[in-house]
Image (cartoon, rainbow, N blue to C red):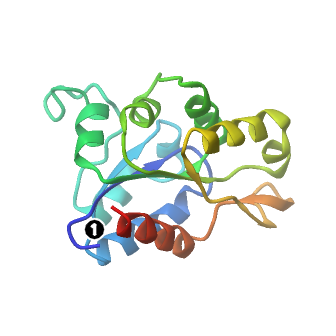
Amino acid sequence: MNNRRIVIGVTGGIAAFKTAALVSQLVQAGAEVQVVMTATATRFVGPLTFAALTGRSVACDGLDEHAFPQGAHITLARQAQLLCVAPATANILAKAAHGIADDLMSTMLLSFEGPVLLAPAMNPDMWNKPSVQRNIQQLEQDGFLLLPPDDGWLSCGRVGKGRMADPELIFKEIDLQLADL
């Protein structure tokens, strides 16, 4: 992964803590990792955690004209070879499936031209909703790569499908996708 440029998107779910392990693993493998977080994600894991792991400031706002005069969504999308959103909440899946661009993460998903890997994580009731499943189908038709959630115990106290894929599995999928570039 030496000199591979990856953007890791972190959305607002409890599984965000697992993304820190993924980011650490990518950096240790030699990747240049830029983390982008939604506002809600910062309530689960602080940006300082990801800044310390990557040695880079975390992008949370696309309107930083000093760091990104053309807009963070454009600059970061042009620099990266792969975009991975982990965890990918039902909210970001819906935005991506319908082309909604109302924050840095969703605008990046629209402006990024390379492979996009989504690792959904949510409550089993949410995952099983027909609307979420329709969004998943649409995203797959649109060429997004999805690592489906695992079955298991979730922070809501339920057991079922909704756990974000293991960071090691996400790492392997990123490595596989980058090998094809």
Task: Report which quarter residue 4 is drawn in.
Answer: bottom left
In the rendered image, the vertical position of residue 114 relative to residue 25, given as above or below = above
Task: Report which quarter residue 78 is drawn in.
Answer: top left
Q: Which residue occupies the foreground of this view, 116 or 41?
A: 116
For this view, does 181 lie left or right of residue 139? left
Q: Which residue appears at 71% of the width and 41% of the height? A: 137
Tag 1 residue = 31
Figure quadrant of the N terminus:
bottom left
The percent coordinates of residue 74 (x first, y second) are 27, 32
For this view, does 134 lie left or right of residue 99? right
Q: Which residue appears at 78% of the width and 50% of the height? A: 123
Figure quadrant of the C terminus:
bottom left
Q: Is residue 21 visible?
A: no
The percent coordinates of residue 156 (x first, y second) are 79, 54
Q: Is residue 155 visible?
A: yes
The percent coordinates of residue 18 (x first, y second) are 54, 65
Q: Amino acid at mark 1?
A: Ala
The percent coordinates of residue 109 (x first, y second) are 44, 36
For this view, does 40 lie left or right of residue 162? left
Q: Secondary structure at mark 1?
A: loop
Crowd around label 1: few <14 · some 14–19 · many ≥20 (10 Å) = some
Number of callouts: 1
Q: Which residue occupies the foreground of this view, 56 or 144?
A: 144
Q: Which residue appears at 84% of the width and 39% of the height? A: 129
Task: Report which quarter residue 162 is drawn in.
Answer: bottom right
Q: Which residue appears at 76% of the width and 36% of the height? A: 134
